[in-house]
Image: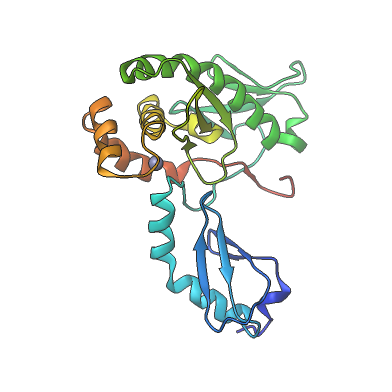
Amino acid sequence: MTTTELHDLDTMRVGDLVLSITPPTERVTLEIVVERDASLVLKAPRSATVARAEEFVASKRSWIYRKLAEKDALVGPPIVKQFVDGEGFAYLGRSHRLLIDDAVNAVRLDRGRFLAPPAVRSRGASLMRDWYTQAGTHWLRRRVRPWASRMGIDPVTVDVRDLGYRWGSARPASGEQRVNIHWATLQLPPSLVDYVLVHELAHLREANHTPEFWAIVSHLMPGYESQKTNLAAIGRGVWLGAVHGSER
Ligand SMILES: [Zn+2]
């Protein structure tokens, strides 16, 4: 049992949850806020200890997961990769082994293997993220077209980026229609990437998870419920960039 003061810390990790800690106020109770971007904030009285805060977060765990799911967050135990020959990386539902090759100067998928330059040993996460971003942008911009035209909102621009703990994001907007997809989404099988795309396209019409929102999703993808369930299950095995060792 530690009696370290909570406010000595900026952030706190409890299992797979990371919370940032706001400066102390005169409040007397602890409170967790799930922000719009799915980040977690802990508010606590000046006297709070780390032990007390950990206990509080643990008791709120299922509430936190429910809130994160409502925000399209991807949550699960962090998957950690090592940049050594034979490590597996998924692309569109298939796993490919890494082979470090002096003769290449950029990551590429070649006959079922990821060939990577030796620099991958020290900068693996960023090199792989770049690869997923580039390959994914190309793939998704073609993939989105039939869905977008069925919704009558062609063209839609897809951007691939790191969205933290969210599969995708989109909001109703006038003018250019744009959806963002997390690079890690590209590890999923195409049918689940489609679900993420359709989900975000529906957000171009309706910002919140209202009955109207789900009606749009269902119209585009009848039987989407099974994809939603699969995403929750398979999504837990997706790599979000965590690396064994010190690289970040
Ligand atoms: Zn959503």
Residue 22 appears left or right of 15: right
Q: Which of 231 and 150 is in front in this view?
A: 150
Q: Is the N terminus in the top left, top right, bottom left or bottom right quadrant? A: bottom right
Q: Quadrant of residue 189?
A: top left
At horizontal 71% and vertical 45% (from top left) the residue drawn is: 248
At horizontal 53% and vertical 18% (from top left) the residue drawn is: 112
Quadrant of the image where one finds ligand 1: top left
Q: Which of 86 and 49 is in front in this view?
A: 49
Residue 192 in the image: above or below residue 33 = above
Residue 154 in the image: above or below residue 19 = above
Residue 243 appears left or right of 219: right
Residue 123 screen position, x and y as percent: 75, 35
Residue 220 appears left or right of 68: left
Residue 231 screen position, x and y as percent: 37, 40
Q: Nearer the viewer, residue 21 or 223?
A: 21
Residue 212 screen position, x and y as percent: 26, 38
At horizontal 40% and vertical 51% (from top left) the residue drawn is: 69
